[in-house]
Image (cartoon, grey):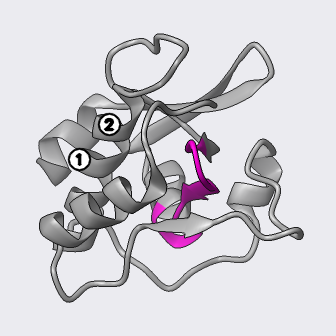
Amino acid sequence: MKINTRFAAAKRRATDLSPGESLPISVVKPSDQPLSLEWWQSNPQAESPGSIRHSAALILYLEISEESKIPLPENTFPARLDFEDETTRPDKGVMKVFLDEGLAAARFMGAQLVCEVTTAAHCNLT
């Protein structure tokens, strides 16, 4: 989904939210399939919800979604982030935890895969 800002701004914000942690956002590689729900659910990651990194990721994803060229429903963020200068995606390990733990629910909005933050996420991560 087209985002009205540059990737560098998102990286700075991610660093501000969780200094010292690995960034919860990644550049899309040729093998990535961020518009496929099955891809997000593949390859289990050893992460658990509730960390500062996960809380920071949720805040970051929702802040980025506010810059979407296509208005998104409240508490929803895209699975692919097409910044002005780079195509990125949320961190796969973070997203897998969000989906597996019921902290986000994936659905399609047109051709775009988006994630809606659940009530459980607001209770556990904010």
Q: Residues within 10 Å of mark 1 (few under 14, many from 20)?
A: some
> Is residue 46 visible to us here?
yes
Please provide percent x and percent y for residue 11. Answer: 35, 65
Please provide percent x and percent y for residue 29. Answer: 78, 70
Q: Residues within 10 Å of mark 2 (few under 14, many from 20)?
A: some
- Relative to 125, is 31 on the left or the right? right
Please provide percent x and percent y for residue 69. Answer: 52, 18
For the point 59% across and 52% down, the residue is: 85
Please provide percent x and percent y for residue 81. Answer: 58, 44
The reply to whether the magenta stretch includes residue 112 is no
Element type where label 1 sits in the image: helix
- Asked if 24 appears above or below 82 in the picture, the reply is below
For the point 71% across and 63% down, the residue is: 28
To which quarter of the image does residue 84 belong?
A: top right
Q: Nearer the viewer, residue 64 or 40?
A: 64
For the point 26% across and 65% down, the residue is: 12
Badge 2 amino acid = Leu
Badge 1 amino acid = Ile
Task: Give the quarter of the figure containing the N terminus.
Answer: top right
Question: Real-space Cα distance between discs 1 and 2?
Answer: 5 Å
> Is residue 51 visible to us here?
no
Whether tag 1 and tag 2 are in contact, CB under 8 A, the answer is: yes
Residue holding disc 2 = 62
As drawn, the residue found furthest toward the right would be: 31
Tag shown at residue 29: none
The reply to whether the magenta stretch includes residue 93 is yes
Q: Which residues are magenta?
A: 82-94
Element type where label 2 sits in the image: helix
- Relative to 91, is 12 on the left or the right? left
- Asked if 62 appears above or below 107 in the picture, the reply is below
Residue holding disc 1 = 59
